[in-house]
Image: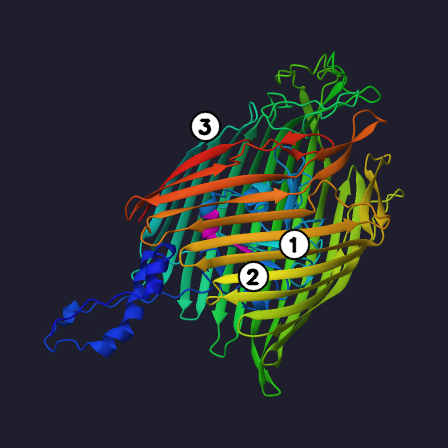
Amino acid sequence: MTRRSPVPSAVCLQRRRLLSSALFASLCVLAAAPALAADETPAPDQDKADVTTLDSLQVKGERAEGYSIRKTNAGTRFNLSAREIPQSVSIISHQRIEDQGLDDIIDVLENTTGISNTRSDSERFEFYARGFYIDSYQFDGIPTTMVQNWSYGDSALDLALYDRVEVVRGATGLLSGTGNPSASVNLIRKHADSHTLTGSVSQTVGSWNRSRTTVDVTTPLNSAGTVRARVIGSYLDTDSAVDRYSQKKKLFYGVIDADLTDNTLLSVGYDYQKKESDDVTWGGFPMWYSDGTRTNYSRAFNPATDWTYWDTTTKRAFATLQHDFDSGWMLKVGATHDQTDVQDVLFYPYYSAGTGYDRETGTGIVPYAGRYDTQRKVDGLDGYVSGPFQLFGRTHELMAGLSYNRRDYVNNAFNYEDGSFPGLIPSYNGWTGNFTEPAWTTSYEASSGVVTQKAAYAAARFTLADPLKLIVGARYTDWKVDGQEGGVPQVNAQKKTVPYAGLIYDIDDTWSTYVSYTDIFNPQLTKDVNKRFLDPTTGKSYEAGVKAAWFDNRLNASLSVFRIEQDNLAQATGQYNDQNEAIYVAAQGTVSRGVEFEVNGELAPGWNATFGASRYVAKDENGDDINSELPQTTIKLYTSYTPRGLSDLTFGGGVNWQNRIYATAYYTSTDSILARQGAYALVNAFARYRISDRFSVQANLNNLLDKKYYSQIYGYGAYGEPSNGSLTLIYSF
């Protein structure tokens, strides 16, 4: 009897390029095994040497397939499908990141449903959801806080070491503790998940002399493959659409994953990132002349001097231990330590009080310079258990954990010699950046402090009936800041228990509907006219929606409505106290309400897409818009397609649209005007061709229609990037 070769299943063929070679081979053999057992009997004299035994590969966690993921613990810590989570969730998978050529966190969040951003200058980007600032981030589920006022480079984190990004919109107090009711961003690291040597090398070249090299290698460290290592390195060197501005970024990441037992996984890793930016902006360019007309600079105009820079170095170490008990319970403990060092020398052109910027003479721009040396250390620890339990004849789930986070920071500023820095610019017309740098002298401590957050949390997922699930939980947070600002002691301590509840009803095997509720608790470091900290922002967040999943959760859809009510929300008065601190008032009755829609995943074999739309209205107690420099309506679409019969070619593209935005801008000390940016759309496209089993080439084009638009309008201006492109060659092994 002649033995036939097993034929891989259709699923294996469709997914081949998405899985590592080792995993693909294992799955295909497993898929073919039942057919072989039923249809064939090996010849009696078959040599035993022909039989190959493959090492087993255990994968803890979930892999993204295309643009979706079947299970995630985002939002609740329970391992659930997207339609089982009673909040709006977006997954930006590794495949989506590769297709769109997304390099950093800025790129990812700009392309995520319901998220918009503002920028303060070339280095600081602030992201918002539902009208509020996003300050809640996680690394592999360990919560941390990122703030942009001193810019520790958080928004420029390189994506090369992350497998995917999970975003839960709305208040997320159950897992993140304090924070705004905007969204929580969880960055999931890549791990050593192959028992054989695998890897890739890519080289990208693009507009403005852009060059990026990335190497990603995974290898077993013992013959059994129970100990594995993954190393990733990346180097970026690029100019930009803005004259003189350039950037270099270096990344190293290493992780070891060890199967201590069949049910115990230990991961230990470290990453190093350094960003060096030259001729950086601080603020932006003047948007108005003193006569109230717009300046209308070219998109290449750089308002900074030629001696400015902003360098950031981040070092982060982490370890996680996960053990799966035979009873179905699981224990997971994670710890992280990171240190960030920032050195920058900056130049800020601002309007002269009373006169403004004269169109004809170019006078009226006053220079201001700053030099800063800042450090931040963050230690985080989080551990929890989860598993099933029986009650009233039904199976339910319980999750409980403890969390600790400590952030130490110190921000040093420098003085300069009297007379070493001019008081006025003779004329800002024809600006080239050639201007005298101050003679820097001694430094002083501008601010420092320690922010600690201790928390205990728990939640239960009850099966009330076969189609009806109830998630209830709470988080107790003990939050404290102890520091100084301008030599004045800063002490604030708050304690709060935040409840959480979500009800999910399965209409059928495809559709579900849900409602959820949680409290809002966010301690504030802003002060009132009497130099007292404002009370914490408090409030309530309500959400309801409908979700659906098709093709074994490979395609997900959601439609949600929400309402967020907040009190004590800090609003700037535009005044300063005698310590040069901004004075705030606590706004009452702030309400944000809106609707969000998203479809994400595999629409058909070879066709992946994400389509998201959001609309919100956020107003204070007087009926005025909150953060009017943010778009209230956004639409984001991206898709990729691999034609049947032409599997070596993948192409696609997308569009991001937003409605108009506006902000009040002063062009003299007393005269103001509304700065506006009308609605606009940015169109992008890509194509990838697999030249051989190991080589592929990809082209990405951004802002195809070369739309000119303001990416910054609050106070000072900046333009978004014009049309640009890149070409990437990838070698895989």
> Mark 1 = which residue?
183
Q: Is residue 353 left or right of residue 86?
A: right
Q: Nearer the viewer, mark 2 or mark 1?
A: 2
**For marks 2 and 1 on the same chain, the one whose residue lies earlier in the sequence:** 1
The local secondary structure at tag 2 comes to: strand
Q: Is residue 585 left or right of residue 482?
A: right
Q: Is residue 620 above or below residue 554?
A: above
Numbered range of the magenta stretch: 91-98
Q: Is residue 262 left or right of residue 658?
A: left
Q: Amino acid at mark 2?
A: Ala
State the separation of the CA atoms marked 1 and 3.
35 Å
Q: Is residue 696 above or below residue 421?
A: below
* Residue reaching furthest to the bottom: 393
Q: Is residue 580 left or right of residue 73?
A: right
Residue nearest the observer in this picture, 576 or 108: 108
Can residue 190 be seen by looking at this rendering?
Answer: no
Residue drawn at point x = 9 percent, y = 76 percent:
45
Give the x, y percent position of residue 136: 65, 53
> Mark 3 = which residue?
209
Q: Is residue 95 magenta?
A: yes
CA neighbours of label 2 inside 10 A, class few (<14), some (14 to 19), many (20+): many
> Mark 2 = which residue?
557
The local secondary structure at tag 1 comes to: strand
Residue 718 falls in image quadrant: top right
Q: Amino acid at mark 1?
A: Ala
Question: How is the protein colored in the picture?
Answer: rainbow
Q: Nearer the viewer, mark 2 or mark 3?
A: 2
Dominant SS of magenta comes to helix
Q: Amino acid at mark 3?
A: Asn
